Amino acid sequence: MSKLPKYMEIYTDIRDKINKNKYELNEKLPDGDTLADSYNCSKLTVKKALDILVKEGMIVRRRGSGSFVKGVSTNGGAIALGPTAGLVNTVGKQNITSKIILFSIEKPSLEVADKLGIQDEYIYKIIRARHINNKPYSLEHTHMPLSLINGLEPKHLEDSIYNYIRDELKLKMHSAHVWIRGDKANNEDSSLLGVPDSSFMMEIEKLAHLEDGRVFEYSLTRHLHENFVFETVFVQN
Amino acid sequence: MSKLPKYMEIYTDIRDKINKNKYELNEKLPDGDTLADSYNCSKLTVKKALDILVKEGMIVRRRGSGSFVKGVSTNGGAIALGPTAGLVNTVGKQNITSKIILFSIEKPSLEVADKLGIQDEYIYKIIRARHINNKPYSLEHTHMPLSLINGLEPKHLEDSIYNYIRDELKLKMHSAHVWIRGDKANNEDSSLLGVPDSSFMMEIEKLAHLEDGRVFEYSLTRHLHENFVFETVFVQN
DNA sequence: AAGTGGTCTAGACCACACT
DNA sequence: GTGTGGTCTAGACCACTTG
C-alpha cells in the first residue's frame, strides 16, 4: 500500500496535472466538495493538499469564488539552499569538483560550540573549495558534532554530506536558518580559491537542525558573487 | 467578540508564554489533549496553533515524546523583507529618511511590463534614496501598476507604501518572490546615494503578489553591503 | 503498555463573492 | 440566495517513543 499520507498523494496529483497543463493557467479547479468526492476523502484532506500548492504559489484560493491556477513550479537556475538541498543536488554532479582542504576532528572554537549548542565535544571541521567547470565557485567551512554525525569519509565530502546523512545515517533534517551578506574577499578566499583580492563574495551562514531540534551543522560558505543568486518566496501566515 | 480565529489566539498566547519564559527553554509543553481542554477547543485547533510555532522554529514536536520549547523569536537586527514588512516598519520611522528622486506615472519598459504581467498600462515608477542616521543606506526602484495602486502621494513615499496599500486601499498582500545577489556599485549608486565607486551593493529583486495572485509591485533595491543582512528560515514541507 | 502526535472523517457553521 | 473556502468539533485510528 501507499506510505505517503493521502493529502500528499492528492497534492502531487494536482501539482502534476497543473505542470502537464491538464489544469491550465487561470483555470478554475473543481470546488472542495467535488475534489473530496473524486479523491474519496474529506474536504479537510483536500484543503491540506491545496494549501501546499498555495504555499508554493501555484494556485490561489478565494473564499466565495474558487481555486485558480496561478503558475507552474519555477526554480529558474537559482541555487536552492533548503535544508535538504545542498549544492551537489541542485547543480548536478558532473559539473562540480570539491577539493578537500581540511578534514579534521577537533574541539570547536567557543563561537562554533555556541552555535552548535555543545560543550567540550569533538566536531568534524571541513573546509572545501568548490569549482564548477574548473572555475572557482565557493569556499565552504562546515562544522558538525561527532555525537550526531559520524563515519564520514572523504568520498562523502566529494559527493554530498547531506545525502550521507539522509540515506546512511537515516537522520531526518528539518529546518535551516540562514543569513546572507556580502563581504570583500579575504586572504583565505584568494589563496584557497584563487580569486583576485578585489573580488566580492556572497557569504551564507547556515544553522541546520534535525527534526528533534538538535543542531547538526554550522556552516559558512563564501561564493563568488558573479555566480550567485539566492531565491526565496515568502507567503503570509 | 474576537475577530481572530481561535488557533491564532492560542498561537499568540503560547508564543508570548515562551517569550516571557513562562515556558522555559527545553521545557516540555502539555500534551495536545491537555492543551485542547485548557483552551476549550479540539486537538486539531491546538495542532494548527502549534504548527505555526514549529514553522517559526520556536518548538519541536516529536511523535511519541511531546512538544518542546526550542528557542525564542529571533530577529537580531536583521532586515525583514516579508510581504508585509517594508523597510520603515522594521527599522523604525525616526531613523530613516527617504529622498524622492523620481515619482512619475509612465508606460513601463517591456521588461517591467513582463514582470508585472501587464500590457499597455500605466505604472508608478518611483526611485527613492534611503538614508539611516544620515548615512547612505539604499537605492530603491519601485514599479506598481496604476490599475491596482492609485492615489499615491509624496507623503506615502516618505512613510511606507505598504502601510498605504494595507490601511487605505484595503488590499490584501499575500506573497513575495525575492532574488538576492551582489553587484559592483554603478554610476547611479554613486551619483544618487553618494557611495564610492569601489563599493559593493546587495541587490534585492522583488515581485510581490496580492491574495488573488495579481502582481502589485516589482522592485529592485540596492543596499550598501555593510549594513545588510538577509535572514530567513527554511522548514521541511 | 502507556503516552503522544499525525492523519482522517462527517458534519456544522461562518465569512465572503457573485448575481 | 447560492456557491465556495475557512474554521472548528468529537472522535477514530495509526505511528512512533519511552519506560
Image (spheres, coloured by chain):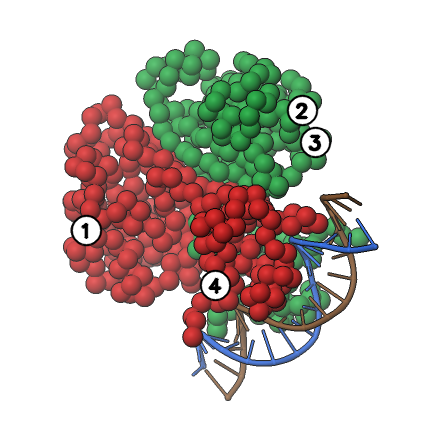
Chain colours: A red, B green, C brown, D blue
Image coordinates for residue B166, horizontal then vertical, percent: 67, 34
Q: Name the residue: 21% across, 39% down.
A: A132
A144 lies left or right of B21: left
Measured in 3D between alpha carbons, the distance from the residue under mark 1 to the one under mark 4, in whole angstroms, is 34 Å
Compute the Cα span from label 2 to label 1.
54 Å
Nearer-the-camera pick, A179 or D18: A179
Q: Amino acid at mark 2?
A: Asn
Q: Report crowding for label 1: few under 14, some 14 to 19, many 20 or more residues within 10 A (C-alpha).
A: some
- Residue B169 marker: 3
User: Which of the 4 image quarters holds residue B100?
Assistant: top right
Q: Residue at 37% across / 62% down in the picture?
A: A172
Asked if A234 appears above or below A39 in the picture, the reply is above
Q: Secondary structure at mark 4?
A: helix
Check disc 2: other Cα within 10 Å, few if <14, some if 14-19, many if 20+: few
Q: Which mark is residue A23?
A: none
Q: Position of residue B197 (x, y in %)?
A: 34, 14
Does residue B72 appear in the picture of this structure?
no
Q: Quick one: SS at disc 2?
A: loop
Mark sitting on residue A158: 1
Q: Residues within 10 Å of mark 4 (few under 14, many from 20)?
A: some
How many angstroms separate mark 2 from mark 3 (CA)?
Answer: 8 Å
The total of numbered circles placed on residues is 4
> How many angstroms separate mark 2 from mark 4 (CA)?
43 Å
